[in-house]
Amino acid sequence: MNTSNSVNKVSFPNACQLMRWHFHPMGFEASMDAPRSMIARLFDRASGETLIAIAGIPCATVMNTGEVARIIQAVEDELESFVPPRAWQALA
């Protein structure tokens, strides 16, 4: 029996906790919006203002650590490509 695979598996709530730790000091929350996808939101802890929200991120109720890392990378990629509306206003 290969126990290394079961050790590397985390439930959705535990995966969310890993992502909260990763994105700290920003706030992070996520919820499943379908059986195989989630909505993630990064927010400013002080103001509660949403920095970015992403829907339709592929996930599962139980994931391995590689899948959690893939979700983190997807959120980081989206965050890097995001230009805040205030920056657009400053350019106008």
Image (cartoon, rainbow, N blue to C red):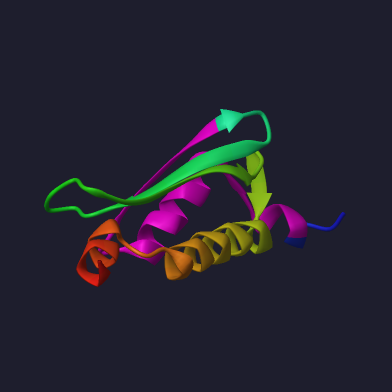
Towards the viewer: 63 or 85: 85
**Residue, x 66% and y 57% (percent of image)?**
67
Seen in the image, is 86 located left or right of residue 66? left
Residue 43, horizontal then vertical, whole percent: 28, 51
Q: Residue furthest top?
A: 34
**Residue, x 44% and y 57% (percent of image)?**
19
Q: Quadrant of the C terminus?
A: bottom left
29 inside magenta stretch: yes
Seen in the image, is 68 located left or right of residue 85? right
77 inside magenta stretch: no
Total marks shown come to 0
**Residue, x 56% and y 39% (percent of image)?**
38
Quadrant position of residue 59: top right
Seen in the image, is 7 located left or right of residue 23? right
Residue 88, horizontal then vertical, whole percent: 29, 64
Q: Residue furthest right?
A: 1
- Above or below, 10 against 39 in this view is below
**Residue, x 31% and y 61% (percent of image)?**
84
Q: Quadrant of the N terminus?
A: bottom right
Give the magenta part as a residue range. 5-32
- Above or below, 57 against 44 in this view is above
Quadrant position of residue 66: bottom right
Q: Residue furthest left?
A: 46
- Above or below, 34 against 90 in this view is above
Towards the viewer: 54 or 63: 54
Residue 30, horizontal then vertical, whole percent: 44, 41
